[in-house]
Image: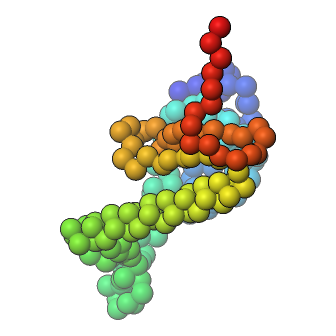
């Protein structure tokens, strides 16, 4: 019944007879925790055995599947006898493409919808450019920036838009169109 002999497993309380009681209880439709109690062990003991013993894990899965089949057969028979809810439940479980709950997600991938998304993106870019220009003008009025130019066509789209000719004033004063004089040694 198990790939690990009882004398080699650390928990000898969950012996072959206790495992049989546990699996029989599962087959009868009892929950795992209650089946463990009926077998005389804690559910943690069952978990440890399941983790250590692949054959036991497979037997547990088989017992759970047998319990589900019993319920399915009852629902099937109720549906055959005219119970509409039972019939629909059975069909929903066994033929989901026709009877199961469906979720519909509509995605509009027509050229008009994609174009509209591009137009929305372009409108947002224009809005952000307007905000940036407003901030530039506000800073220029404060004599913080002299002559900043936003490059419209960024040659490298992975690099943020660049600002050219940015000069910070240390001491605000009158602006001159001529470059500052340089000393020649």
Image quarter in which the C terminus is found = top right
Residue drawn at x 46%, y 38% is 159
Q: Is residue 154 above or below residue 98?
A: above
Could you say which is closer to the camera, residue 18 or residue 86? 86
Residue drawn at x 41%, y 67% is 123
Picture coordinates of residue 26, whole percent (x, y): 57, 56
User: For the image shown, how many numbered marks are present on the structure?
Assistant: 0
Residue drawn at x 26%, y 75% is 98
Q: Is residue 97 above or below residue 4?
A: below
Q: Is residue 148 at all visible to an observer of this figure?
A: yes
Q: Is residue 107 at all visible to an observer of this figure?
A: no
Q: In the image, 164: left or right of 98?
A: right
Q: Is residue 175 above or below residue 103?
A: above
- Hey, which residue is sitting farthest right in the picture? 171
Picture coordinates of residue 120, whole percent (x, y): 39, 68
Picture coordinates of residue 93, whole percent (x, y): 37, 70
Q: In the image, 10: left or right of 95?
A: right
Could you say which is closer to the camera, residue 102 or residue 52? 102
Could you say which is closer to the camera, residue 157 or residue 9? 157
Picture coordinates of residue 157, whole percent (x, y): 39, 42
Residue drawn at x 64%, y 35% is 49
Image color mode: rainbow
């Amino acid at each position: 019944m198990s790939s690990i002999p009882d004398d080699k497993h650390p928990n000898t309380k969950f012996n072959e007879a206790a495992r049989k009681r546990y699996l029989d209880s599962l087959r009868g439709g009892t929950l795992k925790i209650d089946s463990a109690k009926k077998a005389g062990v804690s559910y943690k003991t069952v978990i440890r055995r399941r983790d250590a013993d692949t054959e036991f894990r497979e037997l547990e899965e088989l017992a759970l599947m047998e319990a589900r089949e019993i319920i399915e057969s009852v629902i099937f028979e109720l549906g055959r006898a005219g119970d509409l809810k039972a019939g629909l439940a059975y069909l929903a479980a066994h033929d989901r493409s026709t009877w199961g709950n469906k979720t519909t997600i509509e995605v509009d991938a027509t050229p008009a919808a994609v174009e509209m998304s591009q137009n929305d993106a372009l409108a947002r870019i224009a809005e952000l450019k307007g905000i940036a220009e407003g901030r530039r003008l506000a800073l220029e009025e404060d004599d913080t920036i002299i002559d900043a130019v936003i490059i419209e066509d960024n040659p490298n789209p992975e690099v943020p838009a660049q600002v050219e000719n940015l000069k910070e004033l240390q001491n605000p004063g009158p602006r001159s169109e001529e470059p500052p004089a340089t000393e020649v040694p």
